[in-house]
Image (cartoon, helix red, strand yellow):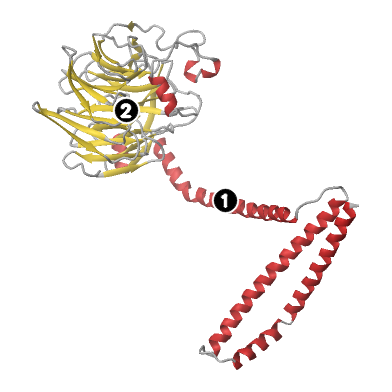
């Protein structure tokens, strides 16, 4: 019984809509007569508007009325279809709400038109960018930026890397696996492993004239240790092909890895591509690598993670940056604290020293970086620069009078030391920027990104190149640091990341600058 009553009501409503539709159609059929009557009425009315203008307005309103009538007729037809479906489903004990079904029909129609528009936009975008992509492929095919060698052996992500300034020239890496390693640049063989830290090793820098390394760690200390290595005979460069997971490292994971965690056995899911040999033992690189456990000097005064450290010009003093919001200046010979540089509102992220002057720049999560001047022993001035909107991940000096700063706000800014009120150039990218480096001779900025890319820019913010990357080449996770070594003929740029490898690149800088 409820079904029959519902169907009869639906038929009555249907008949009413049909009669209303017929009345509208009859109105449309006499449209010309109605327009003529309206014009006669307008002619008899008093109005300040000229008759042609009034006639034009009447025609426009008539067109608008016709459009609304057409829409109304389409709406009635849709409702008629809804009634038909309801009548058909009523016998099965199911009814649809007319409004809901109408919304569904409109959504389907809108989604269809949206998908067509999206497809057109994609086609247009591909066509317009094909020339750019092809030109980029031609550039890389000429080996302007070429991957030369990979340095695999760490059991966790690599935070930092650096190249020695004296002979023998070796590559140093600092890793979250609590070790620092020295590598032969030409062969990729591990020459020495330093295991003196109890936490993540967050940075590594080499003495300007002696065979000494400075490492900063999550165990709240910085170590100075001497090394003695012998370079092996160079081997031919082999083809390189690696695979790995495509992922990034969150800030929470970064903090967890920087702190000294308890000893744990990694589960099977945590094994990355660089751990292929870890299931059976050490990776091939450090299998026969000698290790060093005792530091020459241990610097202790921070109350938090020591995130970075660097040598001042001359190598007699070092500066450390910590999560305790302070940077400390130490005397290398006595290990005594000379100055504690305070003022940042949040944790420090990086520190860097000028290559020829007693200047220090510290970066912080408080979106600022500070320039400390120790050239005058009696006056230690500090300047605060607020050019970023997020964490300043690094700020480095160039050989000239410039400072280049990178940030999590996806920008890199170039500053002039003589006038640092505003940057002289700004590089805008699509991903957070980590520890940058600037080449000495040509001043090319290497930008390591969270999205696994490495890009090269000049000091005028002109993009020069993007290092080649694919599933079988380049970094597979966040790129943490870059370091130039233009004097080396094999590899003049090095990068490292959380895919547990460092990569040596050969960059044809003159060719890049010529194509700019």
The image position of residue 75, as x and y in percent, is 72, 64
Numbered circle sitting on residue 30: none
Residue at the farthest bottom position: 44
Q: Is residue 349 above or below residue 384?
A: above
Residue at image point 41% right, 8% down: 287
241 and 346: which is toward the camera: 346
Picture quarter with the C terminus = top left
Point out residue 225 in the picture as x, y percentages from the top left corner: 25, 11
Residue 231 image offset from top left, x and y in percent: 30, 11
Cα distance, mark 2 to mark 1?
45 Å
Residue 450 location in percent, x, y?
A: 41, 32
Determine whether 82 is above or below 498 in the image.
below
Among the 4 quarters of the image, the one containing residue 409? top left
Q: Which residue is mark 2?
A: 347
User: Dot 1 lies on which element?
Assistant: helix
Q: Quadrant of residue 133?
A: top left
Is 339 left, or right, of 93 in this rendering? left
Which residue is label 1 attached to? Answer: 118
Q: Residue at x 54, y 90 (%)?
A: 47
Q: Is residue 89 visible?
A: yes
Q: Which label's residue is closer to the chain start, 2 or 1?
A: 1
């Amino acid at each position: 019984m409820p079904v029959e009553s519902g169907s009869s009501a639906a038929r009555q409503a249907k008949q009413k809509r049909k009669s209303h539709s017929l009345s509208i159609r009859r109105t449309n059929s006499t449209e010309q007569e109605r327009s003529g009557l309206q014009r006669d009425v307008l002619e008899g009315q008093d109005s300040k508007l000229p008759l042609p203008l009034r006639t034009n307005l009447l025609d426009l309103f008539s067109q608008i009325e016709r459009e609304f009538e057409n829409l109304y007729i389409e709406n009635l037809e849709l409702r008629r279809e809804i009634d038909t479906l309801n009548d058909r489903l009523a016998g099965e004990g199911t009814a649809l709400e007319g409004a809901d079904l109408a919304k569904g029909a409109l959504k389907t129609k809108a989604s269809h038109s949206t998908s067509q528009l999206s497809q057109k936009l994609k086609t247009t975008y591909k066509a317009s960018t094909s020339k750019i992509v092809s030109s980029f492929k031609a550039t890389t095919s000429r080996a302007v930026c070429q991957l030369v060698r990979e340095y695999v052996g760490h059991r966790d992500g690599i935070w930092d890397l650096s190249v020695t300034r004296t002979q023998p020239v070796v590559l140093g890496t600092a890793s979250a696996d609590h070790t620092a390693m020295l590598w032969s640049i030409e062969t990729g063989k591990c020459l020495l492993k330093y295991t003196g830290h109890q936490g993540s090793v967050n940075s590594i820098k080499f003495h300007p004239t002696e065979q000494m390394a400075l490492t900063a760690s999550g165990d709240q200390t910085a170590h100075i240790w001497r090394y003695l290595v012998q370079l092996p005979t160079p081997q031919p460069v082999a083809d390189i092909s690696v695979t790995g997971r495509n992922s990034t490292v969150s800030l929470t994971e970064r903090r967890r890895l920087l702190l000294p965690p308890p000893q744990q056995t990694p589960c099977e899911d945590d094994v990355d591509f660089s751990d292929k040999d870890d299931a059976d033992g050490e990776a091939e690189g450090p299998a026969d690598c000698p290790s060093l456990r005792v530091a020459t000097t241990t610097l202790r005064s921070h109350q938090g993670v020591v995130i970075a450290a660097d040598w001042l010009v001359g190598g007699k003093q070092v500066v450390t940056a910590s999560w305790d919001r302070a940077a400390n200046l130490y005397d290398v010979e006595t290990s005594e604290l000379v100055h504690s540089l305070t003022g940042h509102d949040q944790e420090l992220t990086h520190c860097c020293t000028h290559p020829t002057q007693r200047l220090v720049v510290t970066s912080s999560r408080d979106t600022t970086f500070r320039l400390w001047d120790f050239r005058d022993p009696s006056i230690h001035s500090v300047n605060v620069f607020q050019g970023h909107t997020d964490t300043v991940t690094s700020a480095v000096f160039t050989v000239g009078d410039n400072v280049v700063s990178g940030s999590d706000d996806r920008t890199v800014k170039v500053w002039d030391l003589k006038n640092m009120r505003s940057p002289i150039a700004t590089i805008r990218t699509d991903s957070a920027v980590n520890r940058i480096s600037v080449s000495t001779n040509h001043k090319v900025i290497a930008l390591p990104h969270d999205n696994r890319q490495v890009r090269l820019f000049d000091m005028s913010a002109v993009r020069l190149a993007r290092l080649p990357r694919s599933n079988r080449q380049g970094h597979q996770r966040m790129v943490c640091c870059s370091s130039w070594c233009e004097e080396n003929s094999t590899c003049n740029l090095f990068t490292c990341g959380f895919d547990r490898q460092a990569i040596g690149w050969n960059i044809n800088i003159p060719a890049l600058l010529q194509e700019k």
